[in-house]
Image (tube, helix red, strand yellow):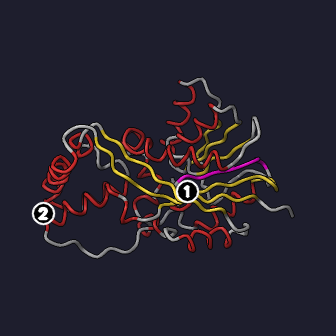
């Protein structure tokens, strides 16, 4: 989902593309249904003409790209994780949809200037080590007058999945170590998100707040699938020998407050949309 670099030890787990290779199936099963709600809003914000040429940068397992193709657009999806790209191609083929899926660093796109009518990135560019460069590349490859839509996390205190997991860990461990702000929350404030667009040479963006639900058949189902992304897997590993107890407590807490069957956990994000200026 992010730029491929050699010194991966300096990057967070979610910023290391090869780590995503091991989470394709779980991410698609557990998390894409949530992010797809954000993707649909981002696609709508592009205000596309029929059969538009659209780039999806850091496309993950392809939820947004597939929706774009279903709407009749000409879609190129890029991601730095080869396994993610292979999954996009497989899903597109199974659905008889045309998507050009390519393994590529979103901070160094190979496309000529003004190659696309529009571009989007859902929780992707905001994870890049150099998010400004990633967004600048989208500006470069989208024609003047075309649209760019970006989604970033906001209101982490309202992200109930991590909130419930932290509460479970706190009840088991007694305290939690202080952690630096993760890269994916760098733009959680609207001012910081707007500054990202400005730094990439784009006009003032239209920013709106989105909310969506992560739905699971049961707390037990979700507890078995918490390691759906590299960052979540690393968080769980950080609990060491208490990991199993933390996960069991997470499940019990959810069952006590929300029941043992289908549950929904809320999350919030910002959608920023902008029109590329004419030179």
Which residue is at the front of the view, 75 or 159? 159
Task: Tell me where residue 156 sits by quadrant.
Answer: bottom left
Magenta stretch: residue 118 in it?
yes
Q: Which residue is mark 2?
A: 172
Q: Residue at x 22, y 47 (%)?
A: 258
Q: Which residue is mark 1?
A: 151
- In the rendered structure, the answer to whether residue 68 lies left or right of residue 276 reads left
Q: Residue 203, position in %: x, y?
A: 73, 67
Task: Tell me where residue 12 sits by quadrant.
Answer: bottom left
Real-space Cα separation, disc 2 to disc 1, in angstroms: 34 Å
Q: Residue 124, position in %: x, y?
A: 53, 55
Q: Answer few, some or many: residues within 10 Å of disc 2's Cα (few below 14, many 20 plus, some between 14 and 19).
A: some
- In the rendered structure, the answer to whether residue 21 lies left or right of residue 69 reads left
State the extent of the magenta-drawn residues as a range: 115-122
Figure check: 155 above or below 151: below
Q: Residue 219, position in %: x, y?
A: 23, 44
Which residue is at the front of the view, 188 or 158? 158
Q: Residue at x 43, y 65 (%)?
A: 155
Query: Which secondary structure type mostly characterizes the magenta part of the structure?
Result: strand
User: Dot 2 lies on which element?
Assistant: helix
Q: Answer few, some or many: residues within 10 Å of disc 1's Cα (few below 14, many 20 plus, some between 14 and 19).
A: many
- In the rendered structure, the answer to whether residue 73 lies left or right of residue 124 reads right
For marks 2 and 1 on the same chain, the one whose residue lies earlier in the sequence: 1
User: Dot 1 lies on which element?
Assistant: strand
Q: Residue at x 37, y 61 (%)?
A: 158
């Amino acid at each position: 989902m992010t730029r491929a670099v050699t010194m991966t030890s300096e990057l967070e787990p979610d910023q290391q593309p090869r780590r995503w290779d091991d989470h394709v199936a779980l991410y698609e099963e557990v998390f894409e249904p949530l992010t797809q709600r954000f993707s649909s809003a981002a696609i709508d914000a592009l205000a596309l003409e029929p059969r538009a040429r659209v780039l999806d940068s850091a496309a993950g397992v392809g939820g947004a790209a597939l929706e774009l193709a279903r709407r009749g657009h000409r879609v190129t999806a890029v991601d730095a994780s080869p396994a993610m790209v292979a999954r996009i191609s497989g899903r597109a083929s199974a659905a008889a949809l045309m998507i050009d899926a390519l393994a590529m660093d979103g901070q160094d796109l190979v496309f000529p200037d003004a190659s696309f009518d529009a571009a989007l990135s859902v929780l992707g560019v905001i994870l890049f080590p150099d998010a400004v460069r990633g967004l600048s590349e989208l500006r470069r490859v989208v024609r003047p007058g075309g649209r760019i839509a970006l989604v970033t996390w906001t209101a982490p205190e309202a992200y109930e999945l991590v909130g419930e997991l932290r509460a479970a860990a706190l009840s088991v461990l007694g305290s939690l170590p202080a952690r630096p702000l993760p890269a994916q929350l760098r733009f959680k404030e609207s001012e910081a998100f707007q500054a990202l667009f400005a730094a990439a040479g784009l006009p003032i963006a239209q920013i709106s707040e989105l909310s969506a639900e992560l739905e699971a058949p049961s707390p037990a189902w979700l507890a078995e699938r918490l390691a759906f992304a590299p960052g979540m897997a690393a968080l769980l590993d950080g609990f060491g020998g208490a990991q199993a107890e933390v996960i069991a407590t997470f499940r019990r807490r959810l069952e006590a407050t929300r029941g043992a069957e289908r549950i929904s956990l809320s999350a919030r994000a910002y959608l920023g949309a902008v029109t590329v200026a004419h030179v």
